[in-house]
Amino acid sequence: MSLIAIEELRKSYGEVEVLKGINLEVEKGEVIAIIGKSGSGKSTLLRCINGLETINAGTITVDGAKLAEDEAHLRALRLKVGMIFQQFNLFPHKTAGQNVMLAQQVVKKTGKAEAEAMARKMMDRVGLAEKFDSFPDQLSGGQQQRVAIARALAMEPMALLCDEITSALDPELVGEVLQVVRGLAAEGMTLLMVTHEMAFARDVCSRVVFMHQGRVHEIGRPEEVFANPQTPELQSFLGVNRAA
Amino acid sequence: MTQFTFMDILRNLLIATEWTVILSLVSFIGGGLLGLLLLFMRIGKSRVLPPVVKIYTELFQGTPLLMQLFLAFFGLGLFGIDVPPWLAAGLALVLWTAAFLVEIWRGCVEAIPKGQWEASASLGMSYVEQMRHIILPQALKVAIPPTVGFSVQVVKGTALTSIIGFTELSKAGTVLTNATFQPFTVYGLVALIYFALCFPLSQVARLLERKMNVAHRH
Ligand SMILES: Nc1ncnc2c1ncn2[C@@H]1O[C@H](COP(=O)(O)OP(=O)(O)O)[C@@H](O)[C@H]1O
Ligand SMILES: [Mg+2]
């Protein structure tokens, strides 16, 4: 059974249908890159999987449980699926360490000592053990994003959704974040990443999803998708990307 | 006829100032507590409560405080309820203060970026947990300078209660003027005392605001 199964997912904002029937199955341990033009619905898809958007039709199943809108179901879902955002969204009034500890204590009711031990482990895992007591505004963008990853990992999710997590970073800081993601992939974490880092997608991902106008337009192994795009839309998208 | 010396005038005004301070504190604290309650109703997820609070704040912000005082004082009298001036003054000022504070505070809650809601939601926090741990602590810091700043308006607002016969600083000024025929001295002193009450408050508000702009954490 797939870890994440999406069937005929539809999502509209008002009159505008943004997702027009998405079907996607993600196996445990898969690393999936979602690519596509701006406005093609990539973020909306991830946000639906995490329950940040209500869906209009179709089903999303995570680890056998169907997504529902009541708070208890959402909470259960979000314990299984973590999310990393483009803008990091660290809590500015808490230190890096407290950012990683908070949800464990509040949501999972983990004791303080145990939460701190977990937080230190995760901060170490993203290479920021020495920044445990720093506030977010004392950290670089790359460091903040790594704290955000540690914060999600501390909840021990089965999968992570990453929405353009390097797009807000200065170029020289992109590498350190991708390095952490690469490590997660190697350890078998299930990842769905919206990304513009084509080289990274080619190297690390098991499958690439090309979205176009609210649909999965093309899907396949990276070597096929990148070397032999089938549709003119993907050909032109990759062409533009190569030129850029 | 007794002669009032300058010191007599000042002493009488200072005694009345006590009532201005007490009424200000009651209005500010009472209005703050009511405002907090209204804030949770206003930003909560209920369908009914937010519009009700919105109408409340618009009524109190859209009518002169003086009319609210009259209504509290005379209006309740029409129903056979005898309202002493201190009660009408306190009631009207508490309701008025709450209406302004709830809007100031709502602005502070809404100023917290959407990403903070989404990040905390994606970690599995419930609405109440998000409020308690993420949104309110950040909103509180933003709210302190404008809240202290608004306290100046409350102090000045208490002056209107003289019209319904509550003997605070302004009322004492009127009484003393009638007794001494020295309006310039008396009202000059009254103004100075108001200034002495309000200036520190507005300075503190400004200082807090500057401090927040320098370091927006902790
Ligand atoms: N909250 C919203 N309200 C209305 N339209 C939205 C909202 N969020 C996204 N959209 C629209 O949905 C479409 C897909 O957006 P998005 O999923 O963010 O695309 P992508 O991440 O691929 O750039 C866009 O046309 C965007 O304008
Ligand atoms: Mg997007």
Image (cartoon, coloured by chain):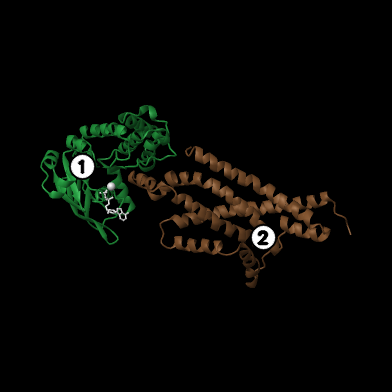
Residue type highlighted by circle 2: Leu
Q: Chain A is drawn in which colour?
A: green
Residue at position x 47%, y 63% from top?
A: B52
Picture quadrant of residue B168: bottom right
User: Who's brown, chain-wise?
Assistant: B
Residue at position x 40%, y 40% from top?
A: A91
Instruction: Determine whether A146 is above or below B69 in the image.
Output: above
Residue at position x 37%, y 46% from top?
A: B115
The residue furthest right is B1
The residue furthest top is A130
Which residue is label 1 attached to?
A241
Do badges 2 and 1 share one subunit? no
Chain of the residue that carries numbered disc 2 in the rendered image: B
Q: Is residue B133 left or right of residue A83?
A: right
The image shows residue B8 at horizontal and vertical percentages of 82, 51
Q: Residues within 10 Å of mark 1 (few under 14, many from 20)?
A: few
Most foreground residue, B88 or B104: B104
> Is the residue at mark 2 in contact range of ligand 1, meaning its CB lies under 8 Å from it?
no
The residue furthest front is A243
The image shows residue A107 at horizontal and vertical percentages of 36, 43
The image shows residue A188 at horizontal and vertical percentages of 20, 35
Task: Kindly report which numbered mark, 2 or 1, lies closer to the viewer in this rendering.
Answer: 1
CA separation in Å, label 2 and label 1: 68 Å
Residue type highlighted by circle 1: Asn
Quadrant containing the N terminus of chain B in the rendered view: bottom right
Residue at position x 36%, y 39% from top?
A: A104
Q: Indicate the secondary structure of the residue bearing disc 2.
A: helix
Q: Residue B96 carries which label?
A: none
Q: In this view, does A110 lie to the left or right of B1?
A: left
Chain of the residue that carries numbered disc 1 in the rendered image: A
Which residue is label 2 attached to?
B160
